[in-house]
Image (cartoon, rainbow, N blue to C red):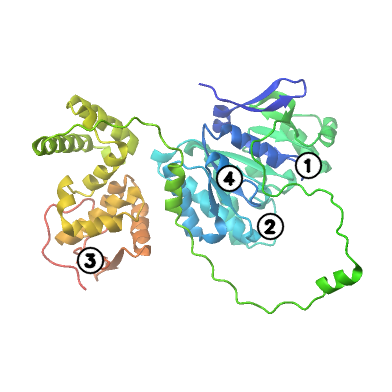
Amino acid sequence: MTVAIEMGQTTAGAAAAMDLEELLATRLLVQGNSGSGKSHLLRRLLEQSAPWVQQAIIDPEGDFVTLAERFGHLVIEAEDHTERGLQVAGERARLHRVSTVLNLEGLDAENQMRRAAAFLGGLFDVDRDHWYPMLVVVDEAQLFAPAVAGEVSDEARKLSLGAMTNLMCRGRKRGLAGIIATQRLAKLAKNVAAEASNFLMGRTFLDIDMARAADLLGMERRQAEAFRDLERGQFMALGPALSRRPLRLNIGPTATSPRNSTPRLMPLPEATLEDARAVILAAPPPDASRPQRRPAPDLLEQLRAAKSAVPESRPEPIEVPVSAEELAERRERVDRTLRAVLAAPDAGFRAVGVLYQEFVVRCRIEGLGAAVPDLTEFRRMLTHARAGLGTDISGDDAWQEVMLRASILPDDMQGVFMMIARAAKEGWPCPGDAAIARAYGSHSLRRAQRLLGYMEEQGLIVCQFDGGGRRFVTLVELAWATAPGDPNADDLPAEPVQSAAPA
């Protein structure tokens, strides 16, 4: 099915549509001087495509935060988070498929570049199972992919330029469709701009920018002066998602507005010179101590809240009383079905949605009918199964504290934590990187190491190594510790080990 995004009208009065699927397979470059209507164009595109595809907006001026109230975007205030926190937020945004606005307002140029690079890196580095289609809009792209070095450090420029290059050059295979907007093509790195296949060129006055815009649209140099005659909100369009020939169009209205509208003329207030002198030249107030910085919000909770903002209309289930024997027999059949699903050689690396579909089919074959667990319950069962735990742990008081601690982690990390907790409780060697990666559903050993580091940052575990390079993990406040284990080991131990980890 082709999804056409209505952008406005052509100068002939016909509807101007953009092929969303073609846009996802290519990329888009928007260019125009200040006041040409670039932000209005981006807002129109985002509003029209919001019901169809996940979005991420890199917003240096806070213009797009108003999308949150109308379309449910999660606004992330970059000033409140570290680069590492924003990288994790980018990963989780793709995992949970939540549209986001990264508001960089209030940061200097270097910190804007660093934080935008970290967030884009998180979007880019997720596992293949989560390469869902996504529009990534970068406003004022010349700030993040400058053609020449500016006043920022070389390290910040390399980080930002590398992230933008990844987005435009390698993002397509990962489901990322880059949409970049710039005031001046001459200030934008050529290797970033050159990857775009669709173009929307607005009003431009400088000769060098007009000539480059004409080259990109395949127009003759003598036709380049037409860009000076474009009105606000008028753009020349070209590309497989727009038009095979240069086409002039007018962008349609938007449902939302930016927080900061265009300044308008207004009369000056009436005041005498003496009144103005008394106000303006009054003694400055004493310096107050800087207010405490508010704590960084929990991005995971925000993501979950944004994901569940739109309620699902489902009929209320009919409660049918069943006996304890029937419940036990039903639980055994569900457990047997789950074990059959996980017995496949590649089950550890398949997406949860795919596993759930196979699980539902097998449950129906077993005759379970309405007793099939929903996706949320299946995720919990899958987490326990990957940790080697059965459904009977709910009655084990020793595991209640473990499950409570695991709940502060993202859903996809909880199974890894409980697998380590089980090894610690039984005195088994610490699982190797391969076993941790497999429980997480990844092939990456480096990702397994990052998982342990993240859990340690959250204050859940302490990782240590003995003199032989073997790793052991202690669960904070629970006094459980694994035995030393080889990080390069390929699998979990088959039998418990009696020796305890050194204190």
Mark 3, mark 2: which one is toward the viewer?
Answer: 3
Looking at the rendered structure, the secondary structure element under dot 4 is strand
First reached walking from the N terminus: tag 3 or tag 4: 4
Residue 494 percent coordinates (x, y): 13, 52
Q: Which mark is residue 478?
A: 3
Question: In percent of the image, x 52 and y 40: which residue is there?
Answer: 171
Name the amino acid type tagged 3.
Leu
Q: Which residue is mark 2?
A: 149
Looking at the rendered structure, the secondary structure element under dot 3 is loop
Mark 3, mark 1: which one is toward the viewer?
Answer: 3
Left or right: 417, with 225 as reference point: left
Q: Which residue is mark 1?
A: 209
Outermost residue toward the left? 325
Q: Which residue is mark 4?
A: 57
Name the amino acid type tagged 1.
Asp
Looking at the rendered structure, the secondary structure element under dot 2 is loop
Label 3, label 1: how far apart the Cα atoms are: 64 Å
Name the amino acid type tagged 2.
Ala
Residue 190 picture quarter: top right
Mark 4, mark 2: which one is toward the viewer?
Answer: 4
**Residue 359 or 173: which is nearer the viewer?**
359
Label 3, label 4: how far apart the Cα atoms are: 42 Å
Residue 321 percent coordinates (x, y): 16, 34
